[in-house]
Amino acid sequence: MLKIAVIDGQGGGIGSLIVKRLKEEFRDSVEIIALGTNAAATSAMMKSRANKGATGENAIIWNSDKVDMIIGPLSISLPNAMLGEVTANMASAIIASNAKKVLLPLNQEGIDIVGVSKEPLPHLIEQTIIKIKEIKDV
């Protein structure tokens, strides 16, 4: 079974939409671990039916290398992102993890990625689902 960490912060709105869509598409064929930079983010993702949830720096660091895939906004890989909620240790653990990373290029931190078209969040989540299907079938 594919083990997926969905990481988000602040209110957890992006993460909760990702978890909801993953559950709709894959049902119980994947295990979803909600990792929030704060309790509100974890709670929002748990309400969207993540299998497990944990909060904070240590939880994100500990679980980053225990999953097959990490999904979240690009900002989870940037130290001090999300109004400072993403620590340098969190970002480092996420990037250093052997897990496949699927990061949504949302421009919340003032970083533009050249060559990536600006799409609304629902479209990015659908592209994420397609990418996960490709990875699962490999």
Image (cartoon, rainbow, N blue to C red):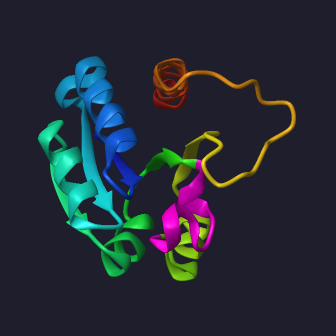
Residue pictured at 38% horizontal, 58% vertical: 9
Q: Residue at x 36, y 52 (%)?
A: 5
Q: Which residue is found at the position 23% from the left and 27% from the top? A: 23
Q: Position of residue 41 (x, y in %)?
A: 28, 55
Question: 35 or 27, which lies in front?
Answer: 35
Q: Position of residue 28 (x, y in %)?
A: 17, 30
In the rendered image, residue 55 lying in the magenta stretch gets the answer: no
| Residue 98 in view | no
Span shown in magenta: 74-85
Would residue 26 be visible to someone looking at this image?
yes
Compared with 134, 113 (above or below) is: below
* Residue 120 in the image, given as x and y percentages of width and height: 56, 22
Q: Nearer the viewer, residue 98 or 39?
A: 39
In the drawing, does residue 47 fall left or right of residue 71? left
Q: Main secondary structure of the magenta part?
A: helix
x, y percentage for residue 129?
46, 23
Q: Is residue 58 left or right of residue 134?
A: left
Would residue 28 appear left or right of 69 to someone viewing this image?
A: left
| Label tally | 0
Does 77 sit above or below residue 123?
Answer: below
Q: Image quarter for residue 60?
A: bottom left
